[in-house]
Image (tube, rainbow, N blue to C red):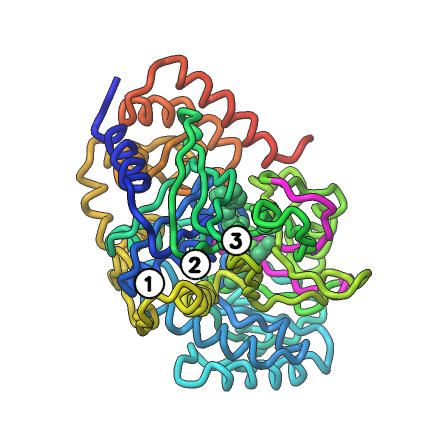
């Protein structure tokens, strides 16, 4: 069976593999790779991006959903990192108002010293944002604190400090970067893992990738190759040089998602110092609350990392110190885990001390590895990487356009939360077949969004749709499992698949989603 959307994949494959010498090949379709690819394409370099699984399948769909300078890094004295991230926060808000909005964060005060202490620190945070600051931070009294966060524990509460940061939808930003990249003539392919690098005269000259849907392998040539594979950068570095020593020391961060009734106001909570010396956030997001995170060193990287029981306990216990009522295990709708690509420091140091800054490393053969950093600074990471890559490959130097580049769908329209992420595309989606039919009664999504994801956003599987085009997996893992059969049927219609394909998709998805639910 063929359909217009099947043909679209064939066209993309053909565009990727036609006998072309690409200026830039980017490997990895997370924040770093998409940022670098968009940077290259907007400078007019012919750019190909290859993603092994799906855009934002890795860490980039598993963040705390903050566009932030990082109050924590300020406490560590890392002023330049915070200043850069606050600048990027301001640019992203201007360039993607449909995906980023301001959010108030409350640090609740239960001791005499905490208000002035955090109040002064946050004035510095405001100042570092310069002209791009959001609203200024301020001290607030008990009554206002309880208006902003009515479920705060009241005993000994004296008010707190309110400051502002940005909030976003991470995988929707990834898809928006993909669409913008395509708008500028870039070619991107998912389900296309790079399985080898090719060399000419000792220099990296391209790569071999596999089309996961057919098993067929293709070779592509490029003047410069950027390795932006997140926690997998070391395996690419070892394809380049079998003896390359690992540069990452990954750690995992767990979030739990609960109903909005546990934090019903319009503000997030920030706990600046948990019992293990970290920060913890409780953030309203798509009519739910995301609570996290942890920082646990992991010996091995995996595509689907799992939370440890003690990480869940830690999050729920810390939340219970501040919230009344506090969520219990039975209230958890979803648990998701992301891996931080932390760049190694000296032997034996703990992961909280490792570099959160981004790092560019160039191997002897010219493979450029881009890693570290955070979602907030993806644009700056891309700019730095493409400056270096252009220099390496002798591409004509060109100025970066991304600081002022509106992203696909740019819109300031004030529309309902879940349509907002589509920006100007929302009306076209609503006009499709199923625009008014809910995919599942407990999820906000319509059937038309599945069709759109397949036609316009390269969704290939039930997981691509329910985990990253829509956020059903993160908002309510159980409901997302129930939505899988209908999603598979819609996708099969769009992509030209049969009943056996649907059954297999449902089986695979339900197994995956079970890993996001808490047992018992
Ligand atoms: C728990 C947690 C919370 C966070 N919260 C925030 C936050 O609130 N705000 C913020 O700004 N930042 C946050 N971050 C940081 C941010 O999420 C990451 O820095 C960012 O997502 C990393 O993106 P990446 O592209 O480098 O990696 P990834 O997103 O992991 O992307 C790498 C991609 O490479 C692909 N790949 C791997 N191997 C191959 C191959 N052989 N061929 C082709 N493709 C391949 C993978 O499939 C993957 O899609 C958080 C991080 C964590 C872990």
Q: Which residue is mark 2?
A: 168
Residue 29 in the figure: left or right of residue 236: left
Please tell me which of labels 3 and 2 falls first in the chain: 2
Residue at disc 2, secondary structure: strand
Disc assigned to residue 333: none
Residue 459 makes an appearance in the image: yes
Q: Report the magenta residues as a range.
A: 275-302
**Residue at the spot x=32%, y=19% of the render?**
497
Disc assigned to residue 96: 1
The location of residue 378, given as percent across then percent down, is 45, 63
Residue 255 makes an appearance in the image: no
User: Marks 1/2: CA distance?
Assistant: 10 Å
Closer to the camera, 333 or 265? 333
Residue 518 in the figure: left or right of residue 50: right
The location of residue 338, given as percent across then percent down, is 59, 49
Disc assigned to residue 202: 3
User: Marks 3/2: CA distance?
Assistant: 42 Å
Residue at disc 1, secondary structure: loop
The image quadrant where one finds the N terminus is: top left
């Amino acid at each position: 069976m063929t359909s217009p959307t099947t043909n679209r994949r064939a066209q993309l494959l053909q565009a990727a593999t036609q006998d072309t010498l690409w200026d830039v090949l980017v490997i990895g379709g997370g924040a770093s790779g998409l940022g670098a690819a968009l940077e290259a394409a907007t400078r007019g370099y012919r750019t190909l991006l290859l993603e092994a699984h799906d855009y934002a399948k890795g860490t980039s769909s598993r963040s705390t959903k903050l566009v932030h300078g990082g109050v924590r890094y300020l406490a560590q004295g890392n002023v330049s990192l915070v200043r850069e991230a606050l600048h990027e926060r301001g640019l992203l808000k201007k360039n993607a108002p449909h995906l980023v909005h301001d959010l108030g964060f409350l640090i609740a005060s239960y001791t005499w010293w905490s208000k002035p202490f955090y109040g002064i620190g946050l004035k510095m945070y405001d100042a570092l944002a310069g002209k791009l600051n959001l609203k200024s931070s301020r001290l607030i009294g008990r009554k206002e604190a309880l208006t902003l966060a009515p479920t705060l524990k009241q005993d000994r509460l004296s008010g707190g400090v309110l400051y502002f940061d940005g909030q976003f939808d991470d995988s929707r930003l990834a898809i928006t970067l993909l669409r913008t990249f395509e708008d500028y003539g870039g070619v991107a392919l998912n389900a296309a893992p790079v399985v080898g690098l090719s060399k000419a005269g000792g220099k990296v000259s391209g790569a071999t990738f596999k089309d996961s849907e057919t098993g067929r392998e293709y070779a592509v040539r490029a003047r410069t190759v950027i390795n932006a594979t997140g926690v997998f950068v070391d395996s690419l570095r070892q394809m380049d040089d079998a003896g390359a020593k690992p540069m990452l020391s990954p750690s995992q961060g767990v979030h739990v998602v609960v109903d909005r009734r546990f934090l019903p106001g319009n503000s997030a909570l920030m706990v600046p110092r948990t019992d293990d010396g970290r920060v913890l956030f409780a953030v309203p997001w798509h009519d739910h609350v995301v609570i996290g995170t942890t920082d646990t060193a992991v010996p091995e990287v995996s595509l689907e990392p799992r939370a440890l029981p003690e990480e869940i306990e830690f999050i729920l216990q810390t939340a219970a110190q501040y919230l009344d009522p506090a969520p219990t295990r039975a209230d958890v709708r979803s648990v998701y885990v992301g891996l931080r690509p932390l760049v190694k420091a000296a032997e034996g140091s703990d992961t909280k001390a490792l570099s959160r800054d981004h790092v560019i490393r160039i191997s002897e053969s010219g493979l450029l590895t881009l890693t570290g950093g955070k979602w907030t600074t993806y644009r700056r990471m891309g700019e730095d990487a493409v400056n270096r890559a252009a220099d390496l490959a002798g591409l004509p130097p060109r100025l970066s356009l991304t600081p002022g580049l509106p992203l696909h769908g740019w819109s300031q329209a004030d529309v309902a939360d879940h349509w907002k992420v589509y920006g100007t595309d929302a009306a076209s989606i609503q006009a499709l077949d199923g625009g008014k039919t809910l995919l599942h009664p407990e999820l906000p999504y319509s059937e038309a969004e599945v069709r759109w994801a397949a036609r316009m956003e390269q969704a290939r599987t039930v997981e691509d749709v329910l985990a990253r085009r829509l956020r059903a997996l993160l908002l309510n893992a159980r409901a997302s499992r129930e939505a899988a059969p209908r999603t598979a049927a819609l996708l099969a219609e769009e992509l030209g698949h049969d009943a056996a394909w649907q059954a297999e998709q449902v089986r695979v998805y339900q197994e995956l989603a079970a890993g996001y639910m808490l047992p018992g």
